[in-house]
Amino acid sequence: MNLLSLVVFLVALYYGTRQISIERIEIKGTTFTSDNEIIVASGLKSYPKLFDIQLSEIKQKVLEIPTVEDVKVKRNLLGSIIFEVLEARPIFYNRNTGKVILSNGKEASISNVTGIPMLINYVPDVYYQRLIHEFQKLDNDVLNLISEIEYRPWKNGDVVIDETRFFLRMSDGNQVYVNLIHMDKLNNYMQIYATLENKKGFLYLDSSSDKISFSLTDEKQPNSVAKSS
């Protein structure tokens, strides 16, 4: 093949590939994000020419979807666009807003999510953002065990002792007091539970002490003034 033939071939190949239309959109890794959300956000609903699109621009558009943590966008000469999606993890449902809070700090309306805690009351904004930040660090196994989250500051009469305190109802029948400072202790819940010998009661993880405080359900229940030591 001489130089002229090579040039003609390359020009023909270039213009030929420029005419390839998108024939197929493949989306991988999604559970909470619909294919339609991704197609609409990416601007591919009209199935444009394969090389008329900028993959970097498409990626940025898809990343604006709340449930998308990250995405890789690829194309091939067969006319396919492939999205490999990493979704943000649902961490709790806010009953007041009707939204699911995600591990990327965003919120979304998701109807098919199960096994996450429900926040049942209002939390002041300054503590709400910290709650999200702390729940982002919790293991999935622990999140699945938390049934309800209630903001419940620890008070002595009219004096607030700890305004970062939360009360958690667990699906195993236990109830946990924890504050924002020591929220990471929840990741030890499975080990703590194993030491309780199937007893049900109130677990206190809101102390800087390494000692685990626990009181049985049939004992005098804790009020807003005192807690076990």
Image (tube, rainbow, N blue to C red):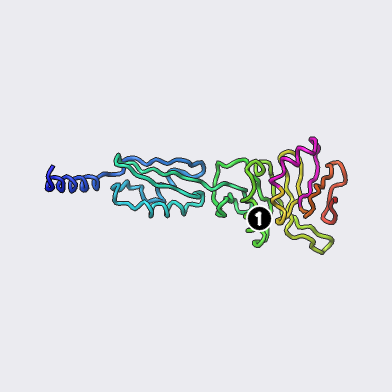
Compared across the picture, whether 163 is left or right of 106 comes to right
63 relative to 219, above or below: below
Compared across the picture, whether 203 is left or right of 22 comes to right
Q: Position of residue 54 (x, y in %)?
A: 34, 53
Q: Position of residue 35 (x, y in %)?
A: 43, 43
Q: Is residue 196 magenta?
A: yes
Say which residue appears at 39% left-offset and 40% top-offset: 26
Compared across the picture, whether 65 is left or right of 46 comes to right
Compared across the picture, whether 127 is left or right of 27 comes to right
Question: Which stretch did the figure color magenta?
Answer: 186-205
141 relative to 206, above or below: above
Q: Is residue 201 magenta?
A: yes
Q: Which residue is mark 1?
A: 131
Check disc 1 and give the amino acid type.
Leu
On-image quarter of the N terminus? top left
Q: Nearer the viewer, residue 141 or 23?
A: 141
Question: Quick one: label 1, few (<14), some, or many (20+) residues within 10 Å?
Answer: some
**How many badges with numbers are in the image?**
1
